[in-house]
Amino acid sequence: MNSSISTPPAHQLQTENGSLQIRFEWQQDRYAHVVRWQSESGEVCEARSEEGSSDQDWPASPALQQLSTETIEGVPTILGVGCAGSSHFSVSVQVLETGGTAADENPLPAVRFDWAVRMSAAAAKEHPDADLGTKYTAEKMLASSLHGQTETVCDPTSDGGSRFVPDPSGGGRTRQWSYDLLGAACADPE
């Protein structure tokens, strides 16, 4: 009998030219992800999800324990689910060749994230301002585009760190947040 435990497989998407990539890899008890882009000058920038631990009800980023890569309407898509505490998380991730737009009208590639969490009725009532969202650490500022009622919070303790959170006024048991990380040239934090 084989007693070894296998590591779940990594999942990756990228633009056709490989200049923008998203990769999910297993770390301890959940998947973490990194977005990597390369500018035309060859500079490589990364944004890494900051994960939490198994004893946190609302970790810095949603806990994802299962991923699959599917094709939805002709677009490769990573779908994920997981849980922490009494909350259940889900995500849909796609690489868009022309996601955001730049001021010069040249479309930028983007990685689109659509997150949701379903909280227990008790947790939603007791913690209407639950600390939900997705946190990134990065050496450079993240270029992003927000969707719906998503907000961004810059982390003053780390260069380029950002956290994308659902609008706290949304309330209810299900909370959603959605954003694009753009394949823009890397920018130094101000």
Image (tube, rainbow, N blue to C red):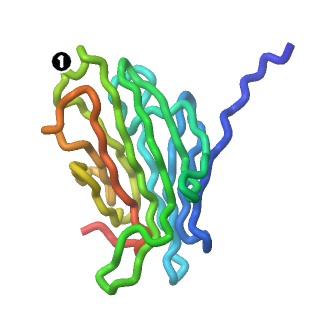
Point 59% across, 43% down: residue: 25
Point 34% across, 23% down: residue: 57
Amino acid bearing label 1: Glu
Relative to 10, is 146 above or below? below
Relative to 22, is 84 above or below? above
Q: Is residue 6 left or right of residue 165?
A: right
Q: Position of residue 15 (x, y in %)?
A: 57, 67
Instruction: Work out which quarter of the rendered image holds the C terminus and state it.
Output: bottom left
Instruction: Work out which quarter of the rendered image holds the N terminus and state it.
Output: top right
- Determine if residue 31 is in view: yes
> In front here: 140 or 37?
37
Q: Position of residue 44 (x, y in %)?
A: 52, 70
Point 56% across, 46% down: residue: 24
Q: Which residue is denoted by mark 1 in the rendering?
A: 126
Relative to 115, is 142 above or below? below
> In front here: 189 or 54?
54
Q: Position of residue 120 (x, y in %)?
A: 30, 18
Secondary structure under tag 1 reads: helix
Q: Position of residue 151 (x, y in %)?
A: 22, 51
Point 26% across, 51% down: residue: 155
> In front here: 188 or 120?
120
- The residue furthest front is 73
Label 1: few (<14), some or many (≥20) within 10 Å? few
- The residue furthest bottom is 104
